[in-house]
Image: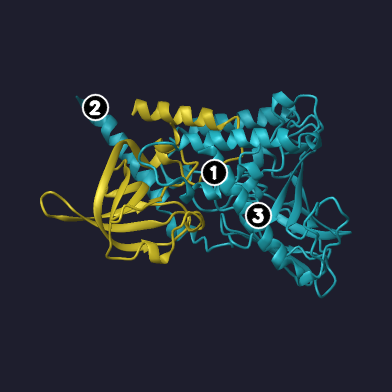
Chain colours: A yellow, B cyan
Amino acid sequence: MRIVIVLVLIAAASLLPAASPVLAHHAFSAEFDANKQVNLRGTITKMDWINPHAWIHMAVKGADGKVVNWMIELGPPNSLIKRGWNKASVPAGIEIVVVGYQAKDGASRANGRDITFADGRKLFAGSSGTGAPYEQK
Amino acid sequence: MSHRFLASVGGLALVIAAAVLASAPASGQAPKASAPAAKKWTPPKTPWGDPDLQGSFSNLSENGTPLERPDQFAGRRLEDIQGEELLKIKREAQQRTVSNFSGPLHAPDQWWQVDLNMIKGSQAWLIVDPPDGKVPPMTAAARDRIAERAEARRNLGRGPSDSYEDRSLYDRCLSRGLPGSMMPAIYGNSYDIVQAPGFVIIRYEMIHEARVIPLDGRPHASKSMRSFMGDARGRWEGDTLVVETTNFREEGIYRNASPATLKLTERFTRIASDKVKWSVTIDDPATWTRPWTYSMPLTKDETQPVLEYACHEGNLGLSNILSAARAEEEAAAKKQQR
């Protein structure tokens, strides 16, 4: 927990001088745990193209064979479109690998950093300006 | 990396410029490709004769521009920071942001850097008045009022996430208020300006507001009628739309201003086929020792139209924040028991 606070403070300090009017809709650290990185391989069941953040729903088979439905938070639709996402790029039924950070409450929800398709292509998924760990290097 | 990136942004800028020029002749006023802003340019009119401000705009490129004049520019005027000098600070801000994202697990840069346009930012800071580029000092009465509010909040003994009511209006998908709704953020910077005889309507992607601004000279609503976005009245001064907004609520009010006395005066002037200059004067004698003004351009961007912002329906963030806070409390309680 202390690590998260320190990271958030660093992010806040680094953003301040250059970018005082910047606002992100929801702060990463209030929802997700920077220490709980997840690597999920699964099948897309649905894509919600909604503001303020889009969500991918995916079915992930665990080592025990049990299928768990995960929700992956992405950036807002207008940003995703500009980054190369479209309706055709994330159809239900295809396999993807998601790298992200799990919800603090332990639910099967994560803030997605990027997704990788079976052919190796990647799409960047995150919202910028949220204070997520990938913004704090 | 940065050269490749700058080259690609430059290419994108050319494509956008070409698209804007190609779409401009509808008004018969297409500017020449060279120095469109320097020449006298006559804005088009609506069929009923008002200056035509309509279109889809964005101010994404001004994201990251500081409100106040940075100390490195002390004694200098905003209009003098141009060309290479301006580009240098914008490039530094851009590179700072890009380097924040570097890491082995990242997607190709082109997937996300295309919408990071800090190098297209047109200003070194935002405040144009007072001339020192700083927010004027607060009045003593305002400082007392703010301290009292903070004290009252502390005395409630509530945490930041005890309930949805402890979160900001923004977290709760209620409003970004004013001038918050006009401020650039990292996303959601799409604005639609739509006109009808006697009205101007501004639609904001973030957060779902539509400001309906009457132009017929009607008086402001009763002081008892208050709202997050206030009560707006507009008029034309030449080619400039002047909008005065009062009747704000205390919740979400701009920078601790007084809802009883805050008056915002915005000016919208179309200065080129693809640009509207926007400014806001913040006047609240109960809070600041003098009025102050900041300004930035809105740039036409038909590639990023206002998308539906069904914020409440999509607001999983708020429930995630509250459930995260409960999980943290539970973990802290368990730790204490041990």
Residue furthest left as drawn? A64
Residue matched to label 2: B335
In primary-sequence order, the first of circles 1 and 3 is 1
Which residue type does callout 2 highlight?
Lys
Q: Amino acid at mark 3?
A: Leu
Residue B90 seen: yes
Q: Residue B222, can we see it?
A: no
Mark 1 sits on what residue? B5
Would residue B100 appear left or right of B9 to someone viewing this image?
left
Q: Is disc 2 on the same chain as disc 1?
A: yes
Q: Identify the subunit bearing mark 1.
A: B
Taking B196 as reference, is A27 above or below it? above
* Residue lying at 36% horizontally and 26% vertically, measured from the top left: A3
- Residue B14, numbered circle: 3
Q: Name which quarter of the figure residue B159 lies in.
A: top left
Quarter holding residue B34? bottom right
Q: Residues within 10 Å of mark 1 (few under 14, many from 20)?
A: some
**Residue A2 location, x and y as percent?**
35, 25
Residue B189 is situated, as x and y percent measured from the top left of the image, at: 60, 53
Q: Position of residue A85 (x, y in %)?
A: 44, 59
Q: CA distance from mark 2 to mark 3?
A: 59 Å
Q: For mark 1, give the secondary structure.
A: helix
**Disc 3 chain ID:** B
B68 vs B177: above or below: above
Mark closer to the chain start, 1 or 2? 1
- The Cα atoms of the two marked residues, 1 and 2, are separated by 49 Å
Residue at 55% across, 35% down: B95
